[in-house]
Image (cartoon, grey):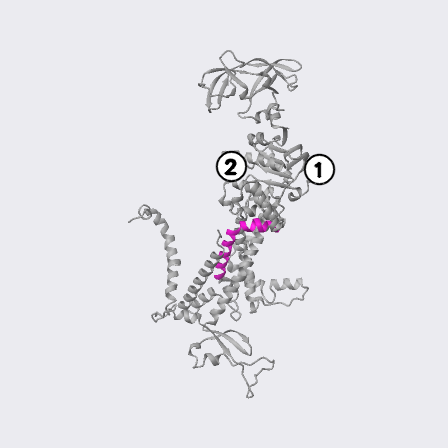
Amino acid sequence: MATLKLTDVRKSYGNVDVIKGVDLEISDGEFVVFVGPSGCGKSTLLRMISGLEDITSGTLEIDGKRVNELPPKDRGIAMVFQSYAIFPHMTVRENVAFGLTIARASKAEKEAKVAEAARILQMEHLLDRRPSQLSGGQRQRVAIGRAIVRKPKVFLFDEPLSNLDAALRMDMRMEIGKLHGQLGATMVYVTHDQVEAMTLADKIVVLKDGRVMQAGSPMELFHEPANRFVAGFLGAPSMNFLDVEVTDRTEREANVTNAALEPIRVAHRNRINGARTAVLGIRPQHVRATEPGQGMLHGKVTLAERLGSETVVDMTLKDGSKFIATFGEDKVFRPGESVDLLFDPERALLFPAEE
Amino acid sequence: MASRLTRSNRAGWLFALPGFSLLFLFIIIPFFFAFWLSLTNQRLVSPNPAEFVGLENYRKLLSVAVVTLEPERDEAGQIERDSDGAIKYPRVRTITRNSDNPQYRGMGEWFRWHSGDNAKVVIASDVVFMKALTNTLIFALFIVPLQGGGALLLALLINQKLRGINAFRTIYFLPVVVSIVVISLLWRFIYDGDDGLLNSLLGMLSFGLFEPVDWLGRTDTALGSIIVMSAWQAVGFHMVIWLAGLQTISPTLYEAAAIEGSSRWQTFRYVTWPGLRNTAVLVLIVITMQAFALFAQINVMTNGGPLDSTQTLVFQAVERGYGKQDISGGSVISVVLFLLVLLISAVQGILTRERK
């Protein structure tokens, strides 16, 4: 079992800085998910932890020991790749035992450990097959099997589910969650899929342009995002942002309004200083529909999507901005229909206009 | 019944005609012609009409026998020895020209070995052909690992991201682009016995201790010299094929191997080599087939000499068909060569096929 500590970790390719100083502590047995848009550096950061990429500056410690210069095999890590990276000419058994073969383990040891891994992953019946005879999900299971036989201190997952179809992805996601519970190992998981991040993580690390935007538990990030990027990144559909005028402010709260929004008071969390304009964030799920003229937000329906369990409504607000609202029931909206929305100002978040 | 191919595409067939007729005229007709000629006594230019002789040409080419020579003995029954102490044997012609053995008529000694006091002599009716056959087989046997292995080594070396790696790729590929005839001429200078480059180089490296060797003029070095030079010439071509194979191997497989702690050799053994399997089969078969077609180097460098030590099948086929105007004799060798290459390729194909 292991702890990880990154201190001001940076990575540059020539003049291009990819990772711009990451500080992070991961405690023993924690499931940490790196999430962020394409090109944010999440995979690079993971590969730096694995040793496949050099660390330009800063320190990486595993179990309190600096490992910057150690090759991957001496870091006590195992990695699962997006493309599975299982060896096509070997059977499943040989693939799972690969690390042991490399370490010249005895035959009996290999047998025992492969059998154990196969039992944990419920793939005993696949052991003598070749990768070409396996489905995507089974291949990824083999890759995970190869990772667990060596009992690594840290598991690294690089978008392991991105090549799978939607249904399989959900199954495998649950299995990885279960596996974490079973093994109790430290896991670092990279994904661009926020559902994976929300469901699997003990701690989510949101990255953007090589910087950590926020790190914390999924609910902390969801309810108390530190900035507009995190607020917009987590949650689907993503949070609505309204440009608002700040008309008045007290120590804790500010009065905000715009052409489509009735004046309301929201907590400013010391984020807007003395600025005259700000951005108000409202989650699509946090609004209720009401009769025209009775709500806090005024707009018209442009498109309604009825999904049965919920209804997603695209709206154009009175000031011309777009707004998405979801209602947790099946409800009929006609395009062009005027709708007013109500929401609890306590659940709205105020961010500075420029970030 | 007109198929779509013949019916709808007159212009297409017209375009294909020049190519087809050339293929037909120079590949397909000669191929079957050779079979026919090998069964006749046709000469290249002759006033006499050709006669059908059946398999007589093949018999003359392939007949081999083993005869036993007993040592010569003096009156006391003691084995006679020469001044070096070697046992004296009667000459082989006492058997081949003996009217008691009409089946050995016209055959000559190919090679011999000793068993007890007796000498076993392998006689063949066409000793030159037999030498050509063995030389070709030896050539193939050495050129396959030398050229294939060397090419793989080069491919592994240049399959790296280094500054100026393209310059190396070009250099290694250069000999492939140059005509083999030109290269053979150049290497004749390199191998020259008096002031050849190789002798000078070896002399310099050994501070003059090395005695110059006439590489192409000795029976024990001529074939080896040609093997080395041939391997060097085509190694770049196979390097490119290996390189193509190497680049189909997914880089994540190497990363996975690195994570598992695989050493360089283990990575080659478990990742690279299995990934090159299909390429290896291709390279193996192509080199083998090229090896059996060995001709230009011999023609330019040694003409089969010295003492037939560099005779090869194709060289003999050309030599007989055109040099000696014995076109049926050349055809027989061609047909035998065809069957031999077919057989070897088939065996290679079976041995290297994917096991399920």
Residue nearer the viewer, B148 or B278: B278
Labels 2 and 1 within one chain: yes
* SS class, disc 1: loop
> Count of labels shown?
2
Q: Which residue is mark 2?
A: A164
Q: Residues within 10 Å of mark 1 (few under 14, many from 20)?
A: few
Q: Position of residue A196 (x, y in %)?
A: 56, 32
Residue A143 position in % (x across, y down): 56, 42
User: In the image, is residue B149 above or below residue B62?
Assistant: above
Question: Residue shown at 58%/53% (left/top)?
Answer: B153
The numbered mark 2 sits on a residue in which chain?
A
Q: Viewer-proximal residue, B220 or A160? A: A160
Q: The magenta stretch spans which residues? A: B265-293
Residue drawn at (66%, 62%) of the image: B205
Magenta segment: does it hold A276?
A: no
* Subunit ID for the residue under disc 1: A
Say what secondary structure mark 2 lies in: loop
Rounded to the nearest angstrom, the CA distance separating label 2 from label 1 is: 36 Å
For residue A64, which numbered disc appears in the image? 1
Going by the image, does A110 lie left or right of B32? right
Lower sequence index among marks 2 and 1:
1
Q: Closest to the observer: A266 or B104? A: A266
Type of amino acid at the residue the image marks with label 1: Gly
**Residue B281 circle label:** none
Give how far across and how far down residue A43 sits, in percent.
60, 36
Confirm or deny contact between disc 2 and disc 1 (CB under 8 A): no
- Residue B240 as seen in the image, left or right of residue B101: right
